[in-house]
């Protein structure tokens, strides 16, 4: 049956009004969050986008400069160094930090006794404010009075220059970062492990599967969805490396820990070049958007396969 | 569910009203001008909020209407600081009853400054280290106060070398230097004695310093010297070292700025540090200024390139005993020069002329009025603060002599420990590199970092590479 168009429109409007009225309370509850996000996230994002095409003078006002901020950023010899460092950190963090929480979670999960103690112990560093853990590790790494060199000395090994060795410094940051963050990720894996049906293990045990085979054929395939998502999240997180080099090394020695976000900070707040800072921010934004799309695609695929 | 919906609508209205009133200070422009007072009336109706701005013309200027805000105010938990501030503001009130001083305890913060300036929430006057003004003047982050300051009778007595820090290329003045120092050699006298060295005779040349550091290492096992190779602050201190070798770092040639810090002098300076670090192993590497002060206080390292004013910080924060330290002049190796530092008050380019004038008058009263100066020193002494740690004379001639005369009565630090520093003549006081100093420091810190992390690094080629980059990326970009 065909409805005359004149009638269809009011009916659609009525339906919209009705749904609005039905959901008014819902929108009301959303309002504070929407306002907070708009003020502190979306508005700055839009401003960042605009400023990246401006010479941003705080006193005289802004001036449009086209692509010149991007030209400046791409011509900066520090740019490839910063990206190389950031990728190096991301790769090292994957090598060292990615499997650590999985192993911790499986170990804690397998424990017959003291499970909650270890869960808490591994989670503890996450509770510390990042600044505190960074400052604590700064002392661990101290060349002359630090903990690590004291240990090396006690067991008769040569001491290291840690944060002053440009070949070692990035590794130092990765170890700290893994220590500080692994606990949180471990909890996610622990939760995922609770979801693995126990009858699978029982069946495997009856078939005489060893611990290793159970791990390989049951545990890992069952949590691979969570693992994939956390992989992408970790890449996104580690590419924004800032706190550790900012507090510990100021990007040194010899630019060895100058990350992309550190460079951005330097442009903006040490040299007052906000246009370049915004331009670099936008570049990083697009790189991370690529990973985020991958993340969303993966989540959808995994939820479909479940 | 009608009841719920009515409550929802009321809730929405109330929430909107609350949110709008929270936003109100941003939507209303509160100017510091005296003539206008803006009054906001909000009419809240059932489903809409109407905001009305009513401009009321205020006729005569009432008392205490000019509000001057400043950084570095008294710490609210410190009775002595509050007492000092009260003393000063009451005194100022007698001269300018129409001015109210609001001093926030927080110091200048380079990271938040630009945003606060843009938002119009920055203080009218802020105290910054000598490393900042040139960068800030170039960016327009400081008001031109030449005309206001030149009316003051002491203006002509300003030490030109100090005033230069807050001047642009045309000689316009953008700030008020309130203390200055020349970088020298701060050292731990106790460690000198322990190593069998005369604590009254600090090394005067870099060769002597190298030998002294070795002796200290051999006799006490402690480090003779320390370096900060990772942060911009380390680059700043290296500037002082390079000056003492005769380097200029950046020079103007044919109207163009040229990076020259791959010259013989700078290479020599860097090579010496490298040899002390890797061959003599007499250098402690420290991450930042706090670590440097701590290791000097704890006696982990004996000598540090720094002005004696660090002792204030070491005394207040680490409990260092001032009599254990001495200051020698900057060791030399052909440059006969050192870097100057200090602090200056700058003024907001967004402040109105009335506020600007009041702020300058307040600064002059607080820091340069002789009666105030004496009162301040007297109360400082009563509180047990350090007085008499040598600083660079800000003025020349009669006015400076009067200040020195007053200071002499209140000194409570052993001046003889600073005699080598104060008696050093013929060392030129050089200001910071004239352009892009902050970027240069960051770059020099990178070079130092390369030396500190690589035993085989070659100073000449490192500096060549750095100069090439700095010239293209920084100096050639200056318009």
Image: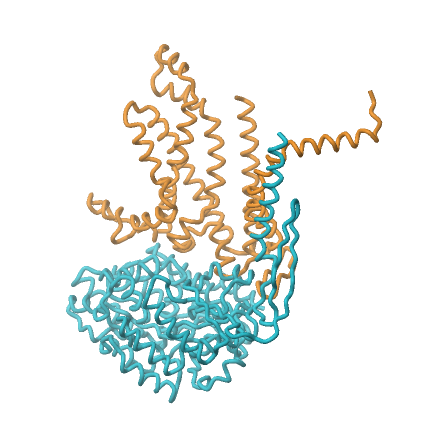
Chain colours: A orange, B cyan
Total numbered labels:
0
Q: In this rendering, would B449 be left or right of B468?
A: left
Q: In this rendering, would B385 be left or right of B40?
A: left
Picture coordinates of residue B140, whole percent (x, y): 55, 69
Residue B258 visible in the displayed image: no
Residue B31 visible in the displayed image: yes
B65 shown above or below A136: below
The one of B57 and A22 positioned closer to us in this rendering:
B57
Which quadrant: the N terminus of chain A?
top right
The one of A112 and A292 positioned closer to us in this rendering:
A112
Q: Residue at 41% x, 75% y: name it.
A: B90
Q: Residue at 46% x, 84% y: name it.
A: B155
- Picture quarter containing residue A92? top left
Residue most toward the bottom? Answer: B398
Picture coordinates of residue B337, whole percent (x, y): 36, 76
A151 shown above or below B188: above
Picture coordinates of residue B178, whole percent (x, y): 41, 75
Q: In this rendering, would B326 be left or right of A174?
A: left
Picture coordinates of residue B463, whole percent (x, y): 42, 63
Q: Residue at 38% x, 16% y: name it.
A: A201
- Picture quarter containing residue B378? bottom left
The one of B243 and B71 positioned closer to us in this rendering:
B71
Residue most toward the top? Answer: A206
């Amino acid at each position: 049956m065909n409805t005359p168009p004149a009638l269809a429109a009011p009916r659609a409007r009525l339906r919209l009004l009705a749904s609005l009225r039905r959901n008014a309370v819902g929108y009301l509850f959303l309002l504070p969050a929407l306002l907070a996000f708009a003020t502190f996230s979306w508005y700055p994002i839009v401003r960042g986008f605009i400023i990246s095409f401006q010479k941003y003078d705080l006193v005289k006002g802004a001036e449009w400069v086209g692509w010149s901020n991007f030209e400046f950023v791409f011509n900066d010899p520090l740019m490839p160094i910063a990206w190389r460092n950031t990728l190096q950190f991301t790769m090292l963090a994957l090598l060292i930090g990615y499997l650590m929480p999985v192993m911790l979670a499986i170990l804690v999960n397998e424990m017959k006794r003291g499970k909650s103690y270890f869960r808490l112990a591994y989670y503890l560093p996450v509770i510390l404010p990042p600044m505190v853990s960074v400052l604590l590790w700064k002392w661990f790494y101290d060349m002359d009075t630090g903990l690590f060199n004291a240990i090396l000395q006690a067991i008769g090994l040569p001491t290291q220059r840690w944060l002053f060795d440009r070949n070692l410094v990035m590794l130092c940051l990765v170890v700290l970062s893994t220590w500080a963050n692994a606990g949180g990720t471990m909890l996610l894996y622990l939760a995922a492990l609770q979801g693995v049906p126990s009858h699978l293990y029982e069946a495997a045990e009856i078939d005489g599967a060893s611990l290793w085979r159970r791990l390989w054929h049951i545990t890992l395939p069952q949590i691979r969805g969570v693992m994939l998502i956390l992989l992408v999240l970790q890449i996104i997180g580690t590419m924004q490396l800032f706190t550790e080099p900012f507090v510990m090394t100021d990007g040194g020695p010899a630019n060895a820990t100058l990350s992309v976000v550190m460079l951005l900070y330097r442009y903006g707040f040490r040299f007052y070049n906000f246009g370049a800072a915004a331009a670099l921010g936008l570049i990083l934004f697009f790189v991370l958007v690529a990973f985020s799309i991958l993340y969303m695609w993966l989540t959808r695929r995994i939820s479909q396969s479940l | 569910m009608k009841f719920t919906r009515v409550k929802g609508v009321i809730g929405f209205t109330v929430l909107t009203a609350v949110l709008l009133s929270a936003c109100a200070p941003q939507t209303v422009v509160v100017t510091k001008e005296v003539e206008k007072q803006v009054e906001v009336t909000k009419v809240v109706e059932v489903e809409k909020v109407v905001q009305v701005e009513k401009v009321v013309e205020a006729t005569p200027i009432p008392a205490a209407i000019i509000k001057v805000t400043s950084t570095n105010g008294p710490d609210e938990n410190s009775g002595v600081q509050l007492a000092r501030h009260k003393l000063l503001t009451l005194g100022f009130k007698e001269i300018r009853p129409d001015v109210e001083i609001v001093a926030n305890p927080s110091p200048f913060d380079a990271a938040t400054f630009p945003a606060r300036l843009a938002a119009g929430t920055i203080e009218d006057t802020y105290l910054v280290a000598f490393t900042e003004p040139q960068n800030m003047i170039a960016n327009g982050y400081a008001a031109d106060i030449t005309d206001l300051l030149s009316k003051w009778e002491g203006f002509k007595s300003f030490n030109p070398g100090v005033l230069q820090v807050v001047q642009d290329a045309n000689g316009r003045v953008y700030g008020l230097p309130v203390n200055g120092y020349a970088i020298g050699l701060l050292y731990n006298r106790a460690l000198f004695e322990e190593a069998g060295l005369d604590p009254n005779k600090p090394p005067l040349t870099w060769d002597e310093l190298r030998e002294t550091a070795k002796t200290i290492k051999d006799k006490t096992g402690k480090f003779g010297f320390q370096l900060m190779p990772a942060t911009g602050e380390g680059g700043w201190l290296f500037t002082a070292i390079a000056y003492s070798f005769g380097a200029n770092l950046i020079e103007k040639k044919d109207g163009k700025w040229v990076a020259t810090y791959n010259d013989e002098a700078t290479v020599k300076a860097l090579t010496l540090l490298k040899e002390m670090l890797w061959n003599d192993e007499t250098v402690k590497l420290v991450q930042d200024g706090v670590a440097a002060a701590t290791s000097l206080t704890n006696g982990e390292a004996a000598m540090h390139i720094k002005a004696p004013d660090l002792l204030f910080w070491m005394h207040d924060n680490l409990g260092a005993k001032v009599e254990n330290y001495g200051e020698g002049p900057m060791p030399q190796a052909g440059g006969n020069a050192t870097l100057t530092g200090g602090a200056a008050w700058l003024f907001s380019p967004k402040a109105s002329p009335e506020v600007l004038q009041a702020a300058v008058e307040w600064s002059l009263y607080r820091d340069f009025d002789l009666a105030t100066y004496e009162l301040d020193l007297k109360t400082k002494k009563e509180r047990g603060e350090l007085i008499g740690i040598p600083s660079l004379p800000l003025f020349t001639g009669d006015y400076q002599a009067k200040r020195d005369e007053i200071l002499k009565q209140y000194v409570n630090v052993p001046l003889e420990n600073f005699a080598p520093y104060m008696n050093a003549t013929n060392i030129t006081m050089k200001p910071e590199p004239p352009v892009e100093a902050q970027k240069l420091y960051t770059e020099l810190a990178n070079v130092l970092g390369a030396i500190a992390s690589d035993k085989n690094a070659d100073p000449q080629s490192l500096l060549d590479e750095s100069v090439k980059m700095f010239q293209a990326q920084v100096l050639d970009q200056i318009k």
